Every structure is written in C-alpha cells, then in structure tokens.
Image (cartoon, helix red, strand yellow):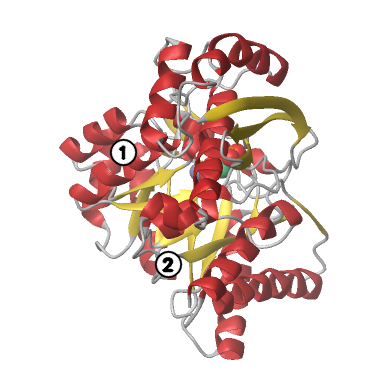
Amino acid sequence: LITDVRLRRILDSRGNPTVEADVLTESGGFGRAAAPSGASTGEYEAVERPPTEAIAAAREHAVPRLVGEAYAGNQREVDAILHAADGTDDFSEIGANSAVAISMAAAKAGADVLGAPLFQHLGGTFRGQNFPVPLGNVVGGGEHAADATDIQEFLVAPVGAPSVEDAVFANAAAHAAVADLLEERDVPSGKGDEGAWAPSIDDSEAFEIVEEAVSRVEDEVGFEVRFGLDVAAAEMYDADSETYEYESAGESRDTAEQIAYIADLVSEYDLVYVEDPLDENDYDAFADLTDEVDEETLVCGDDLFVTNTERLQEGIDRGAANSILIKPNQIGTLTDAFDAIELAGANGYESVVSHRSGETEDATIAHLAVATDVPYVKTGAVGGERTAKLNELIRIADDAT
Ligand code: PGA
Ligand code: ZN
C-alpha cells in the first residue's frame, strides 16, 4: 500500500527543471522516477506543465487519492487514479510530467516490494531473453541544435550485434568515427541536446559522413551495422505553403516530392528506420510512403501517434506507418504506453521505446523496452543521461543471462 508520494523539482540534461517522484509503500518498498521533456514535441502530446505548477496540482489532486488507497504493484489502478485525479483527457490539470513521474515511480516501488527487477515486474517472468537494438543518434540538428542539419537525427542501428553490449559499443564507435570524419573534413562541431554531433553541414554531407562512419564500424566489429533517420518533419512543414522547408540546404518540397525524396533515401542508403518523415497531421502521406517502401523498413510515427491509442488506431485503419514510437511522457502513464504497444502488436505494427531530448539519469525506459520485447530502443549514443539507459540495458542483460 502506498504510504507516501513525494514530488520535487530536479534538473534535466538541458538544465531545465523537471518533476521527480518518490513512491513509498507500507512494506518498505521504494521507487524513484523523473519525467523527461521534449523539444520537438508533437501537437497532440499530453500536456507538460511548468514543474512547480505540476507538482502543486499533483499534491492537491493525485497524492491524497493514492496514499493509503492504492498498491504500488497494481499499475493499472495507480494509473487509473492519476487519470481520475486529473480529470482531463490530456493531463492538463496535474501535468503529464507529474503523472509520468508518479506512474514510473510506482512501478519501481512495486518491483521493489516484489524483489524483482523492473523489467520482470512489468513484462513477466519470461522477459529478459531478447534485447532491443539501440538506435544511436550520431549526427543531428532540427530542434535539437541551431545551425545544423535539417533532418533531426541520423541514427545508427547495429542490427547484427550478437549482444546488447556489442550494440551499445558499436554505436559509441560510430559516434567517434563521425568525429574523425568531421575532423578529416575540417568541419568543427558541437553537440546537440541528445549528444549527437551538430555540425553546420547540410543533410547530403551528413549522409556521406554517416554512411562512411557506419562502414568503418562494420569493418571494425564484424557484424552488420545499418542506419536510419528521425526526420521530425512536422518541424519543417509549413502548413500555409504545404511544403517541407530544408533551411540549411535551401530546398523546399511539396508532399509528393517529400514522399519520393524519403523513398529514394530509404533505397539509396538501405535505411532500416525512418521516423516522422511527414507532417504529424498527414495520415494519407504516411500511408503512401508506407506503401512505397519495403516492409522491412520501419516507418515510425512519433509526433504522428504521440503514444496515443486513438491516433494509432486511426493510423492502423488508414495504413499509415508500420511502427509507433513509445514515449511514456507523451501520454502520461505506463498503462497508456503498454496499451499502445499492445494495440500496435495486435495489428502488425512494431513499437520502438524512446527517450526525449531533455532527459535525466532515470533508466525506466531501458526496462520498459526489455519488458515489452520491442525491436529497437532509441536512447542516444553518449552522454550521461543517455548512457544511464544504455548501461542499464547492459546490466539487465548481464543479470538475466
Ligand atoms: P524530442 O525529440 O524529445 O525533442 O521531442 C525526440 C524525437 O523527436 O524523437
Ligand atoms: Zn521523433
């Protein structure tokens, strides 16, 4: 039984405040979790409130309904209480940041009471056999860095890695190889919010560099390494002109041209993954692109679906995308995230569990990815808030095998 829920403001990786929750139980269980935060957020995400307001509202409405009332291990009950306490359909009262921090902290307290690892509490006793391939962000721009690539993320996918540890190190090697290639070309570079290199180059040069970096790493590690993209196209879409604006390249594409361009990139670079290649309101364009590419390529909806089962159902009905990005803070609770993964799986869609650009050392998503047996997890390549998840995956694999 939950005996206390403590909420506080802590720092995220951008230096912004975010919400951390502690959940304590009668039998001595303890769970702590923190909300991440996006920069290229989807229009339809649950509402993140300023942490001070989110904390005050959650203390007033949610905490009294949980303390002495709910069991931390009963995730559906905890999350239903969060929804009831909030009373809106987008968590605009207590804030999705307070909601997700409490939801994840309750899960950890539940696992603690059971004495089980979090992935096992969430996924059951047979989980931990398969590990997701981490997608490592090595070059990017968009909303995550000023004056860099138009495409938000170039993501290395070590698909042939024999273990999650090999995969994690392959991504770090690709990140280092990109640094070498930038130096060889005399291109200076800082890093974006997720730790990817953020040089002032256009996308075509980034493709050359990432393709070369991936092939160098492949030679070094001896297994297959591919790559993919998060285009985050909603951020480049201009609804008035109905065009996608590539500012650093000085190019503009209408929807048909954007679909053809992405399909060409998929075949030219043998991409395994393309996230948000089209605007978040354009299910039809997503459906056209999904028809056009090989079904082995994941066309993933992030801003399109925002981890929301209603939006996902619409996509399933219209054949838009073939996979969904899962970010618990986009929807507010672990239960909602699980329901989205379940709906996806029942309809032949894959799920990809993801971090946000603003992160903390919280590693819940590593456990969520293992618990739900997803093929990929997106959690960066380097940087403490990113390695928190990657190192947790290595530990889970070490404990489970
Ligand atoms: P965000 O970006 O966390 O800034 O929204 C990540 C993404 O678009 O996948
Ligand atoms: Zn995205």
Identify whether 192 is placed above or below 278.
below
Furthest residue to the front? 27
Q: Position of residue 3 (x, y in %)?
A: 59, 26
Nearest the eye: 43 or 57: 57
Q: Which residue does the numbered mark 1 point to in the structure image?
A: 339
Q: Quadrant of residue 22?
A: top right
Q: Position of residue 202 (x, y in %)?
A: 64, 54
Q: Is residue 210 visible?
A: yes
Query: Which residue occupies 30% across, 30% down?
Result: 311
Q: Is mark 1 within 8 Å of ligand 1?
A: no
Query: Which residue occupies 82% across, 68% down?
Result: 186
Identify whether 255 is placed above or below 66.
below
Query: Which residue occupies 61% across, 34% down?
Result: 24
Q: Quadrant of residue 183?
A: bottom right
Task: Say which amino acid is labelled 1.
Answer: Asp
**Position of 321 compared to 272: left or right?**
left
Task: Say which amino acid is labelled 2.
Answer: Gly
Q: Which residue does the numbered mark 2 point to in the structure image?
A: 128
Q: Is residue 246 visible?
A: no
Identify whether 193 is placed above or below 98.
below
Q: Position of residue 135 (x, y in %)?
A: 52, 62
Disc 1 versus disc 2: nearer the observer: 2
Cβ–Cβ below 8 Å for labels 1 and 2?
no
Say what secondary structure mark 2 lies in.
loop
- Label 1 Cα crowd, 10 Å radius (few <14 / some 14-19 / many 20+): some
**Position of 121 compared to 398: left or right?**
left
Label disc, if present, on residue 179 of the rendered structure: none
Gap in angstroms between the C-alphas marked 1 and 2: 20 Å
Q: Which mark sits nearer the N-terminus, 1 or 2? A: 2
Say what secondary structure mark 1 lies in.
helix
